Image (spheres, rainbow, N blue to C red):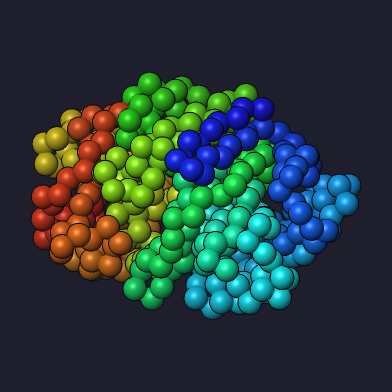
Amino acid sequence: MAVIPVDIAGRPYEVKVGTGLLAGLAEHCQGRLRKRRVPVVTDQRVHAAWGGVIEAALHGAGHEAAWRILPPGEATKSWEQLSALVDWLLAEEVERGDHILALGGGVIGDLTGFAASILKRGCHFIQLPTTLLAQVDSSVGGKTAINTAAGKNLVGAFHQPSLVLADLAVLDTLPRRELLAGYAEVVKYGLLGDADFFQWCDAHGAAMLDGDGALREFAVAHSVAAKARIVKEDERETLGLRALLNLGHTFGHALEAQTGFSDRLLHGEGVALGMVLAARYSARRGELPQASAEHVARHFAEVGMVSEIRDLGLNCDGPALVQHMLHDKKMDAGTLPFVLMKSIGEAWLAKDVALDDVATFLDQQLAG
């Protein structure tokens, strides 16, 4: 088991990465579960796969699970589900010192974390991420949010978990598509600041995806450590450093919005395409060699991911995608910063991007 500290000032916690952590849940949460009934928020698919393991782990330590089982999918990150979840937690008489368990992917982690942040002005929660994407990205760092009609993650709070247990066993039950979507966030750490890690992905990514346990532990632990270093320095994204973690996200969120935040395009798939677009747009501006941009696209294609937006069959043009970007939460005084690349392993925050040029670029990408 790897243990990665996240040294947030005043609120440090650990991310544990290993196999069998959910089965040993009570031991890892020792001292945090104060009552017999433990609130667990999850979705229907995760409950079917892992509910029994959680119940057995809690029961063996004298606890019982109080389940809140939600529909799977991005639509669950809504005002309606947030309100219902808060009412349920109040009915369960959750106190400030209690811990809520978030068992699921990014949707469940985001929703539960946000509910914990506002319940009684702040309750504790523990992340039990069940997707690769959640293990390497969304469960770490304290960003919580819901979606609104105006866009993705526009209402939320910074609220750090007390503990993250990334059980590698869950990856064996993930559909291949979900595994690949999470892999996009693994590759991101190489592209934004670690050329050697991107080379590792080139050499070992396919084997990791195919099930090599040692490679999976390294990929998750290395990604978490990379994010922990950034979050420690810039927890609330005020210095520009944490903004680099948004590589691919501005383009990706626009694609997600165009597809209705539906299963037609998973978040990780949007991020992968967004990183391809960010790399190619960087090349268009003369800041990244074109060969490097095509290397990024080729890498995703070789592991079986869509790497061309024209293949999505979107019924839109470049200006329509840019219109979605205007609702991006990173807008600042009417300007939208873009995370672009100077090389594989070096990203930076550009604040001089003309959106009409982005629209022209996207039209070209859509046309192929």
x, y percentage for residue 244?
31, 42
Which quarter of the figure has residue 344? Answer: top left
x, y percentage for residue 191?
33, 33
Q: Residue at x 48, y 50 (%)?
A: 142
x, y percentage for residue 42?
67, 60
Give the answer, above or below, for where 149 lies relative to 314: below
Asked whether residue 83 is in view, the answer is yes
Side (left or right) of 86 relative to 280: right
Q: Which residue is drawn at 61% across and 54% down?
A: 125
Q: Which residue is drawn at 76% across and 59% down?
A: 38
Give the answer, above or below, for where 178 lies relative to 94: above
Side (left or right) of 247 relative to 79: left
Side (left or right) of 240 relative to 112: left
Give the answer, above or below, for where 37 lies relative to 79: above
Q: Residue at x 69, y 66 (%)?
A: 94
Give the answer, above or below, for where 29 lies relative to 363: above
